[in-house]
Structure formats: C-alpha cells, structure tokens
C-alpha cells in the first residue's frame, strides 16, 4: 500500500466519514431535500411559470388556497350512500380486515392496511357535490379515479399472471431459464418503445390485433380512441411491459420455500394445482404483499402510457394524475396548483411506502 | 430426472412465452420492411411477423439523416455520466454509513431512508424552477444530476459493505492504513459485484427515463433517444414512414437489450434490489 504523505492519511474516523459522505449529502440536499420543501413552498403560492420567469416577484402567497381550488368545491356534502357500490366495498374491506385478523389469517400491518383502505374508501366515496354545489376543479377527482382504476386493473393483472408463470417456471433447467428470459425481455424496454409498439399494435388500420380480427371476419376496434377500450389498451400494454419484475420477485420468493414441503405434500397426493394452492400460496404471502404494494407505488405514478398512447383521451377517460400535474405545470403554467397536486401524490405514495416498510420489516423476524 | 410432464410443461409454457415476444418481434420485423409496402399493408408475410419483402434501408436512412444518431449519443453520455456519478456518491456514502462511527450517524441514515419515499414526480416541478434559475436546462448535467440524489444506491452499497467481516479492516488499521485508503484499496475491489449491480440498475434507469428529460431538455439537440422516440411517434404514419420509426425503436432498445442478454444475472439482481426497495 502506498505510504503517501497526503493530508488524507491524517484524517481520523469522523473526518474520514464526513469526507466520504460529503458528495452524496451535497447532491441529496441540493437535488432532493431542498426541491421537496421548495415544492411545498410553491404549492402555497399563486405561481405562474411564465410570469415568475420574467419577474421573480410575480408570485403571491395564498396559503392553502391551491389545495382548496384543486380538491374542494362549493356545497360539498357527505352521505353513507353517495356511491353505494364503492362504499359497500369499503365496508366489506373493513369487515374482511377485522375477521381475517381475528382468525389470524392476516398479520398486523397487512390487516391494518386493509382496514384503513376500507375506511378511506368508505369515507372518500361518500363525498359529493350537493345541490347547486360544484367542484372547483372538475377534472381533479375524476383524474385520481382514473389513476386508481388503472392501478386496480394493472396490479391484479400483473400479480396473478406473474405468480402463475413464476410457479410454473420454478425449476433450474436451461429451458426454464430461456422461458424466463423471454417473459422478462419486455421489462428492459423504455416506456417510449413500449408505447410505440402498442400504439401500432392497437392501430385499427395497421395494427396486428386489427389484422387478426379482420382475418377472422370481425371489424377492427379503434382501441385507443374508444371510451370503452382506451383504459383497457393502456392496461394491457402496461401488463406486458411490467410483468417481468413481479415474476422475478416471485421466483426469488419461491426459492425460499423448502423443497421438503413439496415432497411431504406429494406423499399426501398434494401436487400440481393443489400444491400451488395449499403450499405455494400460504408460504408466499409476504412476497405477494410486497409485490402488490411495490406495484401500487409504481403504477400510481403512470405517465408515459397515458401521455403517449391516448393523450389522456378520449374524453379524459385515461387522464392520470402525473399527466394532469405535468399539464397543469407546463401547459397551463400553473405551478402553484400543480405543486399542490404533487404534494397530494407524495402523501399517497408516502403512505404506501410506510406500509411497504412495515410489512417488509415485520415478517422478516 | 426430467419426467414427461416436465416436457409437456415446457411445451405448454412456450406458447405464452412466444406470444409475449410477438410485439417485440413485430417491431423488429416492421423495421426491416419497405415503407411503401407498410403504407399499404402491415401483414405481408405471416401477419407481418417475418420481414419479407426485406430492406435495410430504414436503418441506412436513420444514420444518413435525422437526429437519431445524435439522440443515441446523448443517451450514451447521459447514461454513462449518471452511472459514474451514482457509483461515486453511493460507494463513498454507503461505506461511511456501513463501516465508520461518527456523530449524527443515525440521524443521517434515517434522513437518507426518508428520501426513498420521495417520488421523482413530487420534485420535478421545483427541480425545473431551480434549474431554470441556474440556467442549466438543455445540458448534460441537467439530465444527470437529479438522479445522483436518489438514495437507493447508497442503501444497496450500505447493505453490501455491512456484510463484509470486520477483521479485514482491523488488520489494515493496525498497520496504520488510513480509512480513506482502506476504502479505496480494500473495500472497493471487494465491492465490484455490488457496484456492477448498481451500475446496471442506474444505466437502465438513465436510458429509459422519460419524465425529467421531457421537462428539462426542450431543444431537440439535447433529447435522449427515449425522448426523441416519443417526439417522432405521434405522427409516424405521415412524416417518416412506419418502417423508419420502428427502426428508431429498435436502435433505442438495442443497448439495454444487449446489456440484459449479457449481464442477465446482474440485471435480475438489480431489478430485484431496486424493486423491493423502491
């Protein structure tokens, strides 16, 4: 080892530590911590992108007005039967959380998360604009609703198909390795390649899907411009794109299940689908929970698919939260309102991150 | 012992696996067909999945004119720059947090952990205004710097360094080797596999990132290939011809696909690590 007489050599442990931490802490503070608080600060201002760019004093402090203008309205009321189906679903979630927790089928954090989700659904779905009332921003909550719908379709789609494929591919042979590669390949593509492929796949004139429908005598669907199919189209593209990571995480989880369990099960004639149901699923519970939460976080931030494939259309059916933030900020130049929405997004993502952290920690011990 | 049911399983699974690949095959196949043919029909041979009639003209045109080669180079510069930057700040900070004792260690670690919760989408507006104030937009460093602040790499390296036995370090300390030298000469060589994983994770992210480049790079000269591809796909049928746009898509995917096929093990590790920790 070189015995250089550099001043670095004389540093004690604390000095060395801070010297090594310095580059990261600088970028971290400057490009993540500071922007985060600055975002909150912008959200408290009436802040027009163009006006402030020309004159830094053109912003005005307005307190929480942006939040009110985005999320609230006139004569907003709450009732337990404003949206009966959704609210019943929320109550069902609460009931399921309580019973499953009692019978110890669900552990602490997962049960609490399910219960809280039920309470939130019951309360939020009950809010509506009363007589002569209206929302200040008519597009915000429908946009959040679309995002939730997108997540609610994509996450089960990815989870179930990835789980089945992973369970089937859980063998260390060359053929299985090759099949895994094929399923995983689309995961490394960029969002713009994925949307490029699927735009033309779905095209009613040139698309592969339309070509197949025409061969079988049907008339092609205008997937991306039909209100009934646009959301389905971006969900299909997303499932195709992001199946790989869920599959890999499930395969990692499957590795941890002892082979003895399956051998013991085989003695009791528990093989194939029965083995999947009675051995694989119960032992994979923690991985499944983590994959679901991870995907909720990931897909709630959907942007490119909606922005490039459907431009949020038709008729705002596929408008999602991040795209709305982007447009409010950079098309409408309303940085204050856009930042308020970004803070809303952060709160939701943060809540799921905390659940993810708790679940990940709880069941490791 | 491979039973008959195993071969049936492989055979059955090959069908969905092939279907999964079809969209990608189709993109590649279309990129090798003449634009005049594609304007008429996209299902010449086997639904268009086989490039007959064949031409390589789309690729030749791509490199002869248009901005795709420049966007490609921009992506290389940004992805490599980001990878080096993330490696530099993550290995140093990860080592300090994992192996050294110093005042305020726990608060700093917790502060970094909290940063994992902040999604890019929650900070891209303030970042935009900051970079505007600095006059930094439309530059490579504007595309690189924000990702260096994401603490995921620090945690990957921290976990790796924590697993190394203490006595390696203690022996060196007894000989009077400084902490910085231990980091540079002992720890970094050991950390190669973890650095490889982190490098691939970062490179993939950098190559595929869309939202921040969309906001920051407004001049076409500073587009990354991902962003450039987005800008030409909205009106592909009229302007450049379907075959050429698909060729751009193939070019844009080539580096990450090659990276994936060569370093599959690391890519899977990187995605698992990146995935399970946000």
Image (cartoon, coloured by chain):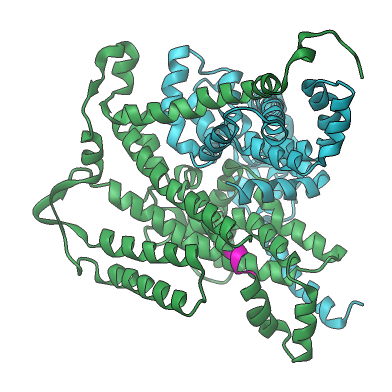
Chain colours: A green, B cyan
Q: In the image, is residue B239 above or below residue A362?
A: above
Depth check: A320 or A257 in front?
A257
Is residue A204 in sight in this rendering? no
Residue lying furthest front: B174
Q: Quadrant of residue A87?
A: bottom left
Is residue A158 inside the magenta stretch? no
Specify the quadrant that holds the N terminus of chain A: top right
- In the image, residue B74 lies at what x, y percent? 65, 24
Specify the quadrant that holds the C terminus of chain A: bottom right
- In the image, residue A27 lies at what x, y percent? 57, 23
The secondary structure that most of the magenta stretch takes on is: helix
Q: Quadrant of residue B103?
A: top right
In magenta, the rendered stretch is: A284-288
Residue lying furthest bottom: A268
Q: In the image, is residue B253 above or below residue A244?
A: above
Residue lying furthest left: A132
Q: Residue at x 46, y 76 (%)?
A: A100
- In the image, residue A128 lies at what x, y percent? 19, 57
Q: In the image, is residue B74 above or below residue B121?
A: above
Depth check: A167 or A205 in front?
A167
Q: Residue at x 60, y 69 (%)?
A: A285
Report the side of B111 relative to A85 (left or right).
right
Is residue A285 inside the magenta stretch? yes
Depth check: B4 or B240 in front?
B4
- In the image, residue B213 lies at what x, y percent? 54, 29
């Amino acid at each position: 080892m070189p015995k250089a007489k550099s001043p670095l050599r004389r540093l004690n442990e604390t000095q060395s530590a801070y010297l090594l931490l310095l580059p990261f802490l600088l970028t971290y503070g400057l490009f993540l911590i500071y922007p985060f608080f600055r975002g909150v600060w912008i959200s408290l201002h009436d802040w027009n992108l163009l006006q402030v760019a020309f004159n830094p004093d053109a912003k005005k402090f307005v307190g929480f007005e942006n939040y009110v203008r985005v999320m609230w309205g006139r004569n907003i009321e709450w009732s337990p039967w404003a949206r009966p189906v959704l609210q019943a679903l929320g109550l069902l979630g609460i009931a399921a959380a309580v019973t499953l927790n009692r019978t110890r089928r669900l552990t602490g954090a997962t049960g609490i998360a399910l219960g809280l989700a039920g309470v939130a659904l019951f309360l939020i779905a009950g809010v509506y604009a009363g007589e002569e009332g209206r929302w200040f921003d008519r597009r915000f909550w429908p946009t959040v609703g679309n995002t939730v719908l997108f997540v609610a379709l994509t996450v089960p789609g990815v989870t179930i198909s990835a789980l089945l494929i992973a369970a089937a591919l859980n063998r260390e042979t060359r053929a299985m390795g090759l099949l895994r590669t094929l399923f995983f390949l689309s995961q490394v593509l960029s969002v713009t390649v994925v949307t490029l492929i699927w735009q033309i796949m779905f095209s009613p004139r040139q698309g592969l899907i339309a070509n197949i429908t025409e061969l079988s005598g049907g008339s092609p669907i205008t997937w991306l411009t039909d209100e009934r199919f646009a959301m389905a189209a971006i969900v299909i593209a997303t499932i195709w794109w992001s199946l790989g990571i869920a599959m890999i995480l499930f395969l990692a989880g499957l590795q941890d299940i002892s082979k003895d369990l399956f051998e013991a099960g085989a003695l009791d004639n528990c093989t194939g689908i029965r083995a999947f149901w009675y051995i694989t699923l119960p032992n994979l519970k923690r991985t499944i929970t983590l994959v679901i939460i991870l995907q909720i976080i990931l897909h709630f931030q959907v942007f490119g698919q909606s922005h490039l494939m459907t431009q949020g259309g038709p008729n705002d059916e596929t408008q999602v939260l991040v795209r709305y933030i982007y447009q409010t900020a950079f098309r409408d130049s309303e940085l204050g309102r856009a930042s308020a929405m970004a803070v809303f997004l952060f709160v939701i993502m943060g809540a799921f991150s905390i659940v993810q952290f708790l679940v990940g920690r709880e069941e490791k011990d | 012992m491979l039973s008959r049911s195993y071969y049936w399983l492989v055979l059955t699974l090959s069908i969905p696996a092939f279907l999964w690949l079809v969209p990608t095959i189709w993109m590649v196949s279309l990129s090798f067909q003449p634009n005049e043919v594609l304007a008429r029909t996209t299902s010449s041979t086997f639904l268009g999945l086989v490039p007959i009639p064949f031409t390589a003209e789309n690729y030749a045109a791509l490199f002869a004119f248009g901005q795709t080669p420049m966007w490609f180079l921009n992506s290389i510069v940004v992805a490599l720059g980001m990878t080096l930057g993330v490696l530099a700040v993550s290995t140093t900070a990860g080592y300090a947090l994992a192996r050294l004792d110093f005042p305020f260690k726990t608060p700093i670690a917790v502060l970094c952990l909290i940063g994992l919760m902040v999604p890019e989408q929650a900070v891209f507006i303030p970042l935009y205004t900051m970079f505007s104030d600095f006059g930094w937009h439309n530059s490579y460093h504007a595309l690189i710097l924000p990702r260096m602040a994401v603490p995921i790499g620090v945690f990957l390296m921290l976990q790796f360094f924590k697993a190394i036995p203490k006595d390696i370090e203690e022996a060196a300390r007894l000989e009077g080797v400084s902490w910085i030298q231990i980091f540079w000469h002992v720890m970094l060589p050991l950390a190669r596999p973890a650095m490889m994983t982190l490098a691939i994770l970062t490179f993939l992210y950098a190559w595929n990132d869309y939202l921040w480049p969309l906001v920051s790079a407004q001049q076409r000269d500073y587009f990354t290939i991902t962003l450039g591809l987005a800008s030409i796909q909205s009106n592909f049928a009229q302007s450049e011809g379907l075959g050429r746009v698909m060729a751009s898509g193939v070019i844009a995917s080539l580096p990450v696909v090659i990276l994936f096929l060569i370093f599959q093990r690391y890519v899977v590790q990187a995605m698992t690590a990146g995935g399970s920790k946000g």
